Image (cartoon, rainbow, N blue to C red):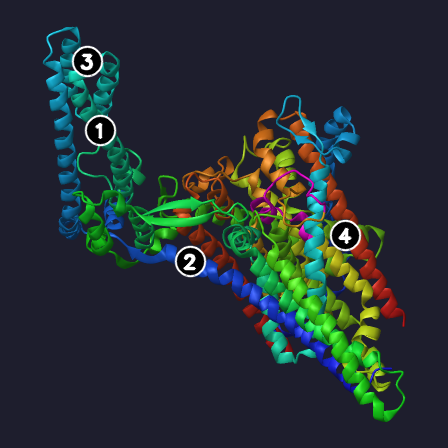
Amino acid sequence: MMRLQTRKLLDRAFAGVGVFAIVLMALALIAILLPIFQRGAGAYVFRATVEHRRQMLDLFERGDEDVLVKEMQKALEARQPVLEALASYRADQSERLNEAIGAADRLAQRDDLLGRRIARAVEQLRHTADLRQQIDRLSRIEQLMRPQSTPDMTDDLDLIRDITSELEVQAAQYGELTERLRQLLGPLPGDEPRILPRFRYGQARWDRALIKQSQLLYIEEWDYSDASAMGRRVLSPRRDLFADTALYPLFEHIENDLEAMLRPRWTFYGRFLTDHSVDAHFFGGIGPEALGTFYLTLGAMLFAVPLGIIAAIYFAEYAKPGRTVSFLRSCVSTLAGVPSIVFGLFGLAFFIYTIRVSPGKSVLAGSLTLGLLILPTVIRAAEEAILAVPREYKEAALALGAGRWRTVLTVILPAALPGILTGTVISMGRAAGETAPIIFTAAVSVGVALQPTEVFTQATPALSWNIYNLATEHEAVDEIRHVQYGMVTTLVGIVLLLNIAAIWMRARISRKLRG
Amino acid sequence: MVDMGNRNHAPADDLILSARANFRRKAGAWLGQGILFAITSVAALAVLFIFYFIARDSIPFFASRGFAEFFTDTAWYPSREPGHFGALPIFVGSGLVTLGAVFLAVPLGVAAAVCLSDVLPFSVRQVVKPIIEILAAIPSVAYGFFALVVFAPLLQDAGNKVLMTAWWILAGPTLLLLVMVLGDLSTTWVKNEKHVRAARITATLLIGCVAAYVLVAGARFMGAITIITGTNALNVSVILGIMALPTVVSVSEDALQAAGRELREGSYALGATRAETLCRTILPAASSGILAAAMLGIMRALGETMVVWMASGNAAQIPEPFFNYLMPIRTLTATIAGDMGEADHVTGSDRYHVLFAMGLCLLAFSFICNLIAEWFVARQRRKLGGE
């Protein structure tokens, strides 16, 4: 037998374990909700750059054009030094190139077949505008001549080789740099116009712009020298590649004056919830998804709530204990345990392939499937609410001569209504959040907002499905994290609001019942 | 006034129904009840429909490929021509994550339920209940997103630190407690009052050294683990465990409440502490209900789709060794969700029907779990009601 002290200790430890479990649960809830809400809020409230305001004007016709033009002018002024650095770097490069072309000209002076061929190649070269192609052609000339060269040509050939190899490296570095610049600030002057909006604008969000800035300033490399550990990320400044060139000051500008170039400003983008998406969610909002979730939930409720309440009335008021009723109850509880993905399979096999409620995936088929999924929850909640109505109500109604039907319709249902509503609201949250049942029956990845008349035949995007889709299958998963977080926050926010409403309603009912 | 008089007679006439009206009324009630019954049956029998349609579409697969390949083969190549459908790794994957989730959710859930029903005061309970409800209400895709975007990178970059922290938090207090109890128990044979104190301190110190060694060695072991990918069975198990917690807590709390005041008061009267009362009297009395809670937790974890699809790695392989939770796995639900998109184009092929076969297995398993849970609940009711 243990000593009393140890027994007391164990007793306290036992309570401690329970408290620990509850604290852990609360921590888990915070750990999950906090990052979601914190980063999800960033989809609605963020520092929007002038590029965002340009998009809003171009794509949604929002904002004041005159103000924007003035602002854009200021931004372009700030960007001017960057563009000048680029231009003077290009000028230096073509000077170097001209040196090489001069050497090629000297080679072409020879009065033989070789000389004429060189002269023709140089002529072609002069008609090429692109620096890269010019370098290519020059180095091809050099390689072509090298085997047939005479000793007096060696110097010039060497010069051409040195310059072209130097320029080749520089052109590659320059190309990468300008690509980063385009991502940051949008197309550079002289670029071919491109169709996809993601190439037509610079970074619309300041947080993304800072990431792009650091990608521009630093080259990311992975160090695998330690074979036993995983690769280590190494950042090396990109400006080191351009030391002693005209581009060197550019990095200074990008590092210090980016705010002037993009002019970030805190913006509340409330229309994120209703805007359609632009260019596969690179820009714009989540309107079609939110509307799809709304249709699906509404459809599921229209199907499940009447059916569920009728079944609950039957179970609570009419059913006599017996084999049939207990079998029916078993069926309902089994239905509650069916995995959600199996509902999806059933919806596909039954609603779409067998009774053909629609030619393919549709909101209707999805709603029916979701409705079936939440049916047991609705039945249970409604039955509990009906059973919670005090017996006296019913007895009083019967004593006054009301029939059974009348009692149910005029006394029991109104009294049970708040309880039924609570259960309904909770199952609404469930229907809005479910994904698996709608994968095969209703959801598409890309779609427009549906008109109410199209719900019988058309599939729709939905918040729950598109969270999955954007987080795993999108072409640039990392670029649109804010949209993903925004969607998750919206969905979780809707579901939580519904649940909090239900909790509040229930608290009110229990207060009322306690008197 | 005259009218008044007339009215006074009227109710008496109305109260006695003519035979026809009586029949009409009865028939109406009967009909109404019939309609109610019919509608209820439709709602309830939907589950039979589900069974029928899933089974109907899975029969072609078993008819053409038999059972042996599906249940015992480890090669899963559905897109090859001809396909190969060995689903054993997928069954193992489902089993692993379900087991992991249950190991996490049942002890924690039962501890929380005990705390809720017997330890915490009413006012605190009112705060904790909504936490559990909200945990249950968060959509599975949000959990999946968290597992993929927040938890998986954390595991991949600092997995050993996460495991080490978990080890310290869980093993530290447990071992400390164990040392004190063992130190006490190992000296009960010392009868001499003078020596008891010295013996207890010696024993506690000795056992404490062993425990400290175990603690540090365990922490070292955890710290040395490298996690190659964050999307693995461990990640999914933890998240599924959190998702199954609310079910386990609320069902086992109901069971504990149902055990009744008299049992508790009897035990207290015999001099037992609260822990002893709960462990020796209440938990055994509520064991059926707690087992039912575990069953429901298993069902929740097994049937979950989005979390495992997003964060399990979806590799159809049996981990090496088979209990290695740090390897990516693939589950039945994720396979159905992931493959249907492609299999759907070839309706009628084995590739399409094999997914229904998996659905049938899931359905059968959750049906059995449900039956067991219901049986447990019924037994609990009988047991407590009979006393």
**Three-letter residue code for mark 3:** Thr
Local crowd size for mark 2, using a 10 Å CA cut-off: few (<14), some (14–19), many (≥20):
some
**Three-letter residue code for mark 4:** Asn
Residue at position x 68%, y 65% from top?
B108
- Does residue B382 show up? yes
Of labels 1 and 3, the one closer to you: 3
Where is residue A182 drawn, in percent x and y? 26, 41
Local crowd size for mark 4, using a 10 Å CA cut-off: few (<14), some (14–19), many (≥20):
many
Query: From the viewer's perspective, is residue B271 above or below residue A17?
Result: below
Q: Earlier in the sequence, mark 1 or mark 2?
A: 2
Q: Which mark is residue A150?
A: 3
Q: Secondary structure at mark 3?
A: loop
- Does residue A396 show up? no
State the CA–CA distance, disc 2 to disc 3: 68 Å
Q: Secondary structure at mark 2?
A: helix
Local crowd size for mark 3, using a 10 Å CA cut-off: few (<14), some (14–19), many (≥20):
few
Image quarter of residue B345: top right
State the CA–CA distance, disc 4 to disc 3: 92 Å
Same subunit: marks 2 and 3: yes
Q: What residue occupies the far bottom of the structure in this picture?
A: B194
Q: Are marks 2 and 3 in contact (CB under 8 Å)?
A: no
Residue position marked by numbered label 1 in the rendering: A162
Where is residue B383 drawn, in percent x and y? 87, 67
Q: Which mark is residue B370?
A: 4
Where is residue B168 drawn, in percent x and y? 63, 67
